Image (cartoon, rainbow, N blue to C red):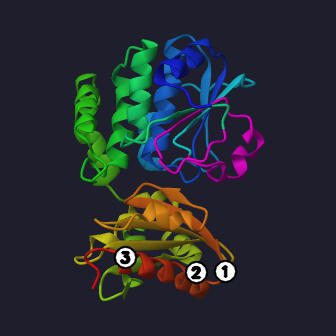
Amino acid sequence: MDVTRQEAARLLLAAEDVLILCHRNPDGDTTGSAHALRLALRSLGKRARVQCSDPFPNRYSFLWQEVEAEDFEPKFIVSADIADEGLFGEGLAPWLGKVDLAIDHHVSHRPFAAHLLLEPDSASCCEVVCLLLREMGVDIDGKIALCLYTGMASDTGCFKFSNTTPRSHRLAADMMEAGAPCAEINKRVFETKSAGEFAAEREALNSMEIHFDGQAALIVLSAEMYERCGVTEADLGGIASLPARLEGVEVGVTIKERGPNSYKISMRSVKWVNVSDLCRQFGGGGHMFAAGCSLDGSLDEVKRTILSAVGAALARCPGSR
């Protein structure tokens, strides 16, 4: 059942012992929104904890430092920034079909919770959570603002992506005024990389293929490369934007090996192609300019399948050549 922000606030204010779920391969938005909600609930005297199938990237460790872990049997379960139960991962399998409230901003959301607060006009889930906390009467202090600003900046590419709205900037400014150290956050999240991340990025760029007269670019991240560079998929969250940065490219494709004959596809578009619609053909989704899906098969088979769909989408673009 879809709920309003006011109804979601009432649900959370009445809830006790809250478990907050993040999607697998956590990014800054799912991480920031979940930890902000946890801090907010704890400020109201409630017990709350965050759980994810995969480890949180070290770049976001400042979001939960100095917060004592709590162990309890959940009585109310919330998901933050999860668009589909398929994004739970194996570690969250016990909670499938048991989510009481889903908080999300993906237009491609596939309902799975008893109650859904969906605001697709928001650039990030953290925007939704920020407005929800205000509805709940929560005092957004510096620690909560830190989490919220991190998610807002993460999902907007530090406010450079086309999903950024005037409200995005206003809410980010509010978080700065509440004590979020934006310069430190931006430095850590966007400007700092490990040696392994640099090595992986170099290998990804070396793998780049150009297709359709320069309108599409594709890179591949293999399991062997992860091991060789000493990184995980979560460490390379921002790498999916690399192919679309090449001049003239409309669609950038990143293929990440998940296991034998199993691949995750991340797509980014610049102006014309709705990659959410494109990925939905393969059971995925996301936003118009950023989306993903999963495919099984050999690498060559996956490439052919994806490039065929990308080529068809490009052929329908007004500026196709």
Query: Disc 3 residue type?
Result: Arg
The magenta region covers 83-112
For disc 1, the marked residue is 297
Q: Is residue 298 above or below residue 80?
A: below
Foreground: disc 3 or disc 2 = 3
Q: Which mark is residue 316?
A: 3
Q: Residue at x 54, y 86 (%)?
A: 304
Q: Residue 63: within the magenta?
A: no
Asked if the stretch drawn in magenta spans residue 105, the answer is yes
- Please tell me which of labels 1 and 2 falls first in the chain: 1
Q: Residue at x 72, y 25 (%)?
A: 74
Question: Contact, CB < 8 Å: mark 1 with mark 2?
Answer: yes
Above/below status of 149 relative to 76:
below
Decide: few, some or many residues near mark 2? Use Cα within 10 Å; few <14, some 14-19, many ≥20: many
How many circles with numbers are drawn on the protein?
3
Q: Give the residue type at disc 2.
A: Val
Which residue position is annotated with label 2? Answer: 302
